[in-house]
Structure formats: structure tokens, C-alpha cells
Image (cartoon, helix red, strand yellow):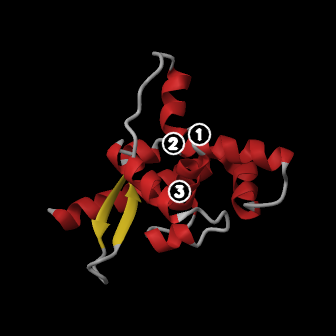
Amino acid sequence: MKEIQHRSNCPIAYSLDYLGDKWALLILRDLIFTNKASYGDFLASEEKIATNILADRLKLLETTGFINSTVSTEKKNKFVYSLTEKGIDLIPVIVELMIWGSKYNPPGAEDVIKKLEKDKEGTIRQYREKLLQRLKDKAAINE
């Protein structure tokens, strides 16, 4: 994983330094909208990410504070990934990308899109609360 060099103080440039890569966004998507949480889960996504790229993006997302990894309780050589509060704060951004993408490329994520069309703020709040609760539960277990 290469170190990120910020080119300017522009908030958009700063955000793109971390999230301008499609693989990072797709990993975050999977953590938010699916039950995917392990290396194997992400590898099985339909986009077919290469193993070296997946390992690099997971390391980048963890190093930059978007996700955490813990050893699986079921299998000691397996890591389980979860969003941090910093990652959870990206839900509205990813939702907007999803809405925009569904407008110009309609197929895909129909169930989430329908929920967003019906009640965008409520749907974002539900995902956020669910993921924050997971974060709290994880913290309680680690105490």
C-alpha cells in the first residue's frame, strides 16, 4: 500500500485521495448494504476484484480509519471487517452515488433504491443506526 500524498487542501481532492478508487467504494458498499465482512465475502462480489487489489484496499481502508478488522471467533486465521464511525459517516455519500447511478444505469440495487425513493432520510438513518449498534456491540465485547 502506497502512502497517500495530499495534493491540495481542497475537500474534494482530499476525499478523492481516499475514496477515488472504485474498489474502496465497493468494499464500503458491501459493508453497508450486505452482510459481507470477510476477505472471502468481498472476493465473491460480482465485480471480481483481484486478490492483491483487495488486500491493498482493505489495508488502506483500515490504515486510514474507515474500517477495523478483528480475528473471527469461528476461525482464528480469518479476519472480519467492520465500519468505523468514519466509515459509517460515508453512508449519505454512497447513497447519493447509488441514486445517481441508478438514474443513468437503472438495473441493480432495486430493493435499496425503492427504500430510498420512499424515505431517503429514514433509510439512511436505519443503515447508520444498525451499523453504529454493531460498532457499540463490538466495543462492549472487547471491554
Alpha carbon of mark 1 to alpha carbon of mark 2: how far? 5 Å
> Closest to the observer: 71 or 8?
8
> Closest to the observer: 45 or 113?
45
Question: In the figure, is residue 138 to the left or right of 90?
Answer: left
Q: Residues within 10 Å of mark 3 (few under 14, many from 20)?
A: many
Image quadrant occupied by the C terminus: bottom left
Please state the horizontal and vertical placement of residue 14, each as a whole percent of the image.
Answer: 48, 26
Residue lying at 63% horizontally and 66% vertically, measured from the top left? 48
Question: In the figure, is residue 46 to the left or right of 81?
Answer: right
Question: In the figure, is residue 139 to the left or right of 30?
Answer: left
Q: Secondary structure at mark 3?
A: helix
Give the answer, above or below, for where 24 lies relative to 39: above
Q: The residue under label 3 is which amino acid type?
A: Ile
Where is mark 3, residue-wise? 27
Mark identifier at residue 93: 1
> Closest to the observer: 120 or 79?
79
Q: Residues within 10 Å of mark 1 (few under 14, many from 20)?
A: few
Q: Earlier in the sequence, mark 1 or mark 3?
A: 3
Q: Are marks 1 and 2 in contact (CB under 8 Å)?
A: yes
Quarter residue 141 falls in: bottom left
Residue that extends furthest to the bottom in the rendered view of this protein: 74
Please state the horizontal and vertical placement of residue 73, each as a whole percent of the image.
Answer: 27, 79
